[in-house]
Amino acid sequence: MRLVVQRVLSASVAVDGEITGEIGKGYMVLVGFSEDDGRKEADWCRNKLMKLRIFEDENNSMNVNIKDAGGELLLIPQFTLYGDVVKNNRPNFRRAMKPDEASELFDYFFEKCSEEIHTEKGVFGAFMDVKLNNYGPVTIIVEKEFKDD
């Protein structure tokens, strides 16, 4: 499972010109699943996301998590995070989770994040227009794969 986390002052996502998710200060997160991912990886990534300390404290050090900063989440499903271009120039998505399974896991991840803080989301499988005001900029990649568990 891969997350691309961008610290933002604001972010929104629209489908066909209609806003489906919008937040103020927080994280805009691109979410991708590999063929081997499941709830265990989603739970680990949710916990890491909530504990990630990339907001500044009173000394301007990255030391504050999203909950303590009063932030929100905007989750964007993005299977292209598993596009492999090592051998070719056209991405190969063979490691990406199948759409039906990925949609279900994305909904689970959204629900779990929503239990922690205010969370909005994009529309799975839709062509989305994502806008963000990146703050910093700060972009962190969170990735988890469990082997032999």
Image (spheres, grey):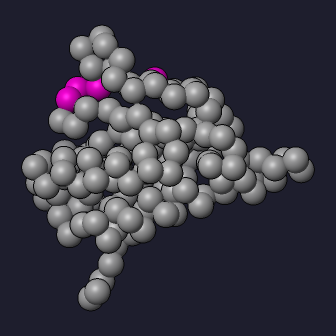
Question: In the displayed structure, would residue 138 be above or below residue 128?
Answer: below
Kindly identify the residue that appears in the image at 34 percent across and 62 percent down: 42
Q: Quadrant of the N terminus?
A: bottom left
Kindly identify the residue that appears in the image at 62 percent across and 33 percent down: 25
In this view, the residue in front, 40 or 77, is 40
In this view, the residue in front, 75 or 147, is 75
Whole-percent x and y of residue 47?
49, 63
Residue 121 shown in magenta: no
Whole-percent x and y of residue 78?
29, 43
| Left or right: 61 as drawn, with respect to 96 | right
Question: In the displayed structure, would residue 148 be above or below residue 91?
Answer: below
Q: Please give the count of numbered marks on the rendered protein.
A: 0
| Left or right: 120 as drawn, with respect to 18 | right
Kindly identify the residue that appears in the image at 66 percent across and 53 percent down: 65
Q: In which quarter of the image is the C terminus?
A: bottom left
Name of the residue lying farthest toward the top: 17
In this view, the residue in front, 66 or 13, is 66
Question: In the displayed structure, would residue 35 be above or below residue 99?
Answer: below
Q: Can residue 129 be seen in this view?
A: no
Question: In the displayed structure, would residue 119 be above or below residue 3?
Answer: above
Kindly identify the residue that appears in the image at 25 percent across and 32 percent down: 123
Q: Is residue 8 visible?
A: yes
Name of the residue lying farthest toward the bottom: 148
Name of the residue lying farthest toward the right: 59
Using the rendered view, name the quadrant where residue 95 is placed.
bottom left
Using the rendered view, name the quadrant where residue 14 is placed.
top left
Whole-percent x and y of residue 57?
81, 49
Magenta extent: 126-131
Whole-percent x and y of residue 83?
25, 51
